[in-house]
Image: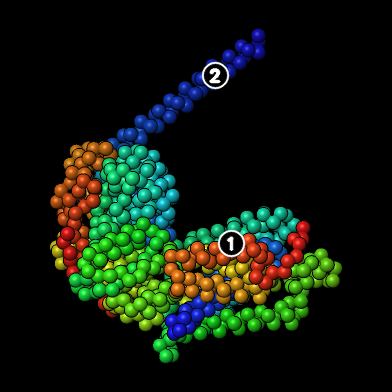
Amino acid sequence: MLEFIQQMVNGLSLGAIYALIALGYTMVYGIIKLINFAHGDIMMVGAFVGYFSLTLLGTNIIVAMVFSMLVCAILGVLIEKIAYRPLRNSTRIAALITAIGVSLFLEYATIFILGPAQRVFPEAAFKVKAYNIAGLSVLNKDVFVIISAVVLMLILQYIIKWTKTGKAMRAVSLDQEAAVLMGISVDKTISITFAIGSALAAAAGVMYGVYYSTVNPLMGIIPGLKAFVAAVLGGIGIIPGAMAGGFIMGLLETMVSGYGNSLYRDAVAFGVLILILLIKPTGLFGKDSGEKV
Amino acid sequence: MKKSSKRVAMLVLMVFMLAIVAGCGGGGTGDKTTEQAEKINVGVNVELSGGVASYGTNARDGAILAIEEINQAGGVLGKQLNPIERDCKSVADEAMSVSAALVGEKIVAQIGPLTSGNVAGSTPVMMDNKIPLIAPAATAANVTVDDKTGATRDYIFRVCFIDPFQGTLMAQFAADNLKAKKAVIYGDTSSDYGKGLAEYFKKTFVEKGGEVIAEEGFVKDDRDFRAALTKIKGLNPDFIYIPGYYQEVAPLIKQARELGITAPMGGGDGWDSPDMVSVAGAAALNNTFFTNHYSSQDKDPKIVKFVEAFKAKYNKEPDAFAALGYDAVQLMVQGLKDAGEADPVKLAAAIAQIKDFEGITGKMSIDEQHNPVKAGVVIEFKDGAQIMNTRIQP
């Protein structure tokens, strides 16, 4: 039982990171039907901004996270303006390939500027403490990751449900042309969506750095891929789906390693994706509606 | 009629121009051969970027130091060595195309790449062109021997011992020195290296009367090991064998200690990186051991001299990869001297015959499978420092 609770803690903190990245995927997909493959790399940039604000500016971890979210929000808006906006009316495949191009650009531009070596997140920025509760080892970084993820998700829910911007985002996602007719600025709304999604990825990047101690220019690829699976699992385009998908992925991976065999971890995770796509292609939270053409 | 004569004239003109161009080309090649006569080109195909950049960079530094020392001492066969350095980016496909490019530069031998997988990428090109490849640290058994036919690859050599030896050595150490009975293997299953070490560790450990109670695996670029580690903690083993590379092993050990696992842990030379201490932390690394090719703390005068020269040039401590890179060049030079000329085919034949060659990483003889027979050491992490624990002679 104790081991099971330990595995739950492991799974939740891993899932929280996946969920934060998955949110960005799903928000962007919801609004412009683009799978933003550069999203994992925005997380990487976020991790590096966090790293440098900790080491060079000497800020604490919360300031580093906020700073990194701001920088990545701007980066996300710029990427959308430069790379995706000119392609908004072209085929989806053109935008998709551009997204892969942006992803490679971010990875190799970082390697070019900072070099390919991994960097170690400063230990002093986040003193790791282990709380031993009846044989259960809970680290303060688990608590930090899970709580900040939940807080960010609550803020996101508030923005989407209760603010004018959120209403505009939902409207644009539902029907772009009708939204224009209602006086909503589509360009502005899409920019805001990218800003929020990228900021969440940046937060995930800083958490990843704290949690796993290292950052490197190619670190975004694998979590990006897993978060993409999480987003599809929950139903891409659906925000609660991305959150649930992230946590499900984290728990699933943990349980397979913990109670099955770690060798089958990825096979089971991706196997579940295939099953979902076969049985319920719209994802766990998806509503069956005909594809708009 | 008129038209066709014009055509003939054009044709003659074209042939004439072609002849001029060809003449120029010929002249160019001539210059190149005389230039090559003065220098012996040595390809250095190593990982300067990507996952195992620190291995490649250090081996390159060791190899370049050896080449400079040889050139200062008058070169080989009256000629200077000319290193041609290329980055294979820690990718097997890239190692292959780099080798193809180096073959075009008329190299006499190639030093590198470092990992077994990348050497395997480069192998077909070297075999097809009959140019020897000297791998500094590729420890998988099938690097020099064809798995299917069991035949030795004529042009592939190495200066390091092979995986079976590393796995066997650590199993001996765990059973004899640490008195371990129940071991868990948690290794990199995405590399030949990790799988090879695990296989031979298991074999020897069981032969020694121990028991492998669980086998878990991770893949390259994994950063979360807590699920499997929680399970391992429940099994309560007295030794954990972690054959893998430092990028994954360092966070793995850190997470293991955070979860309260106190058992000793061991691995292979993939652990040998300064990043181990900076990522995992000195305290977490206490009570961990790895097998290696050499230790810079060795008091052998040959090693002391090498360490001093290396420090003077690069201002850092030479690790095993640097020593092996150095030895790879020295072995090639010995081969060139024995062969008497800078011909790749004769060089390969000469290297295959080398016996009792005195390298920095120990005295070695090349056996019929192109593996050096040599000693290894077990190194222990103590408060962040690498301390030589014991030396094992085969």
Residue B229, visible in the rendered structure? yes
**Residue type at numbered disc 1:** Ile
Q: Position of residue B379 (x, y in %)?
A: 24, 69
Q: Which residue, given by chain and number where applicable, does mark 1 sit on?
A: A274
Residue A216, visible in the rendered structure? no
Number of numbered labels in the structure image: 2
Q: Which residue is located at x 21 percent, y 59 percent?
A: B361
Q: Which of the pair B294/A274 is nearer the observer?
A: A274
Which quadrant: the C terminus of chain A? bottom right
Q: Which of the pair A245/A202 is nearer the observer?
A: A245
The reply, left or right, for residue A288 in relation to residue B227 is right
Q: Mark 1 lies on which chain?
A: A
Q: Residue B13 carries which label?
A: 2
For the residues carrying marks 2 and 1, which lies nearer the camera in this image? Answer: 1
Residue B201, image quadrant: bottom left
Q: What distance separates the C-alpha of mark 2 from that of mark 1?
A: 66 Å
